[in-house]
């Protein structure tokens, strides 16, 4: 039921990317603030909620559990999302333990929420809520943040064994003013809502480029590619089956033609037509089953 509910939620979830245009005076421009983006999209009919995210890289490429030098208590992570308080709610990931982000969490170093896999990796057999998380390697001077909740792990495409499940860490801190991603929850899956939002961002925020696409775009593309490959194999199988049938028909027809003199002799000696037909069908089915 939870999987079906998440699939339904993804139909009205859109993901937008905000980029700075490449121009001669790019150095003088900055990405728009969250307030500017929210104000720009506030008048778009059909948008219910918005959330924002920006990426940060942990020092040393890992995040570490509290008071440990054990390499098994770290998670390799190229970057972690620094999100607005409503991010997990808009995305549709429920809190399993602890609490969700609150507006006051951005003050100071901030707080973190882990998904179930990250919590199990960093604090196996222990309660992660209330513990500390270092946004870097154990030996680095990276900031420590408090873990306030554990959320359900994001859904993966079933049957995809190419990639192992990845742990997720979300952080809410004052260092989240730069936004490169905006999540939009709409009242319906109507793509015109996202198109209107994208057009408004490009027109009213100078110097930036914006793309808005369905949240499950990658999953749709993966399913479409798998469906295409399945259809290719079905067509190839049908062609192979047709060639095999044609070949068997040719061999059987050739065999019958070569035995025409034999059939004539048998009929002349009094063989019944029914018996002749049974003999031909028997030899044909043997050949067909072997083929």
Image: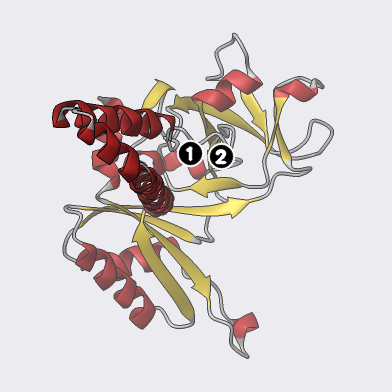
Res 140 label? none
Q: Residue at x 18, y 28 (%)?
A: 270
Residue 7's place in the image compared with 3, above or below, is below
* CB-based contact (under 8 Å), mark 1 and mark 2: yes
Q: Seen from this angle, which residue lies furthest right?
A: 139
Q: Residue at x 59, y 8 (%)?
A: 125
Q: Horizontal placement of 193 versus 106: left or right?
A: left
SS at mark 2 in the image: loop
Q: Horizontal placement of 96 versus 68: left or right?
A: left
Q: Which residue is mark 1?
A: 105
Q: Determine if residue 216 is in view.
A: no
Q: Residue at x 16, y 27 (%)?
A: 272
Q: Which residue is mark 2?
A: 110
Residue 225's place in the image compared with 248, above or below, is below
The answer to which of 106 and 32 lies nearer the viewer is 32
Q: Seen from this angle, which residue lies furthest front?
A: 269
- In the rendered image, which quarter is residue 20 located in? bottom right
The answer to which of 97 and 85 lies nearer the viewer is 97
Q: Horizontal placement of 236 versus 185: left or right?
A: right
Q: Residues within 10 Å of mark 2 (few under 14, many from 20)?
A: many
Measured as percent of width and height from the top left, residue 156 is found at 45, 36
Q: Residue at x 50, y 61 (%)?
A: 180
Measured as percent of width and height from the top left, residue 261 is found at 33, 43
């Amino acid at each position: 039921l939870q999987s079906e509910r998440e699939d339904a939620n993804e139909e009205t979830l859109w993901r937008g990317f905000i980029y700075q245009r490449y121009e001669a005076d790019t150095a003088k421009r900055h990405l728009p603030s969250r307030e500017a983006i929210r104000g720009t999209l506030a008048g778009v009919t059909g948008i219910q909620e918005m959330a924002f995210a920006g990426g940060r890289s942990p020092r040393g490429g890992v995040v570490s559990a509290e008071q440990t030098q054990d390499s098994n208590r770290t998670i390799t992570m190229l970057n972690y999302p620094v999100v607005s308080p409503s991010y997990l709610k808009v995305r549709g990931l429920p809190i399993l333990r602890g609490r969700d982000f609150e507006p006051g969490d951005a003050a100071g170093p901030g707080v973190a929420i882990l998904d179930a896999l990250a919590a199990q990796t960093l604090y196996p057999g222990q309660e992660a809520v209330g513990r500390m998380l270092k946004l870097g390697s154990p030996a680095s001077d990276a900031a420590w943040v408090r873990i306030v909740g554990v959320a359900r792990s994001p859904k993966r495409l079933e049957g995809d064994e190419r990639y192992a499940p990845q742990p997720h860490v979300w952080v809410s801190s004052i260092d989240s003013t730069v936004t490169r991603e905006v999540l939009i929850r709409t009242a319906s899956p109507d793509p015109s809502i996202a198109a209107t939002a994208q057009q408004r961002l490009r027109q009213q925020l100078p110097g930036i480029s914006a793309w808005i696409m369905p949240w499950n775009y990658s999953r749709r593309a993966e399913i479409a590619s798998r469906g295409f490959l399945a259809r290719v194999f079905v067509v190839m199988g049908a062609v192979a089956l047709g060639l095999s049938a044609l070949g068997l028909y040719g061999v059987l027809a050739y065999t019958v033609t070569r035995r025409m003199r034999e059939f004539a002799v048998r009929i002349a000696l009094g063989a019944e037509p029914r018996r002749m037909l049974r003999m031909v069908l028997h030899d044909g089915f043997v050949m067909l089953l072997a083929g």
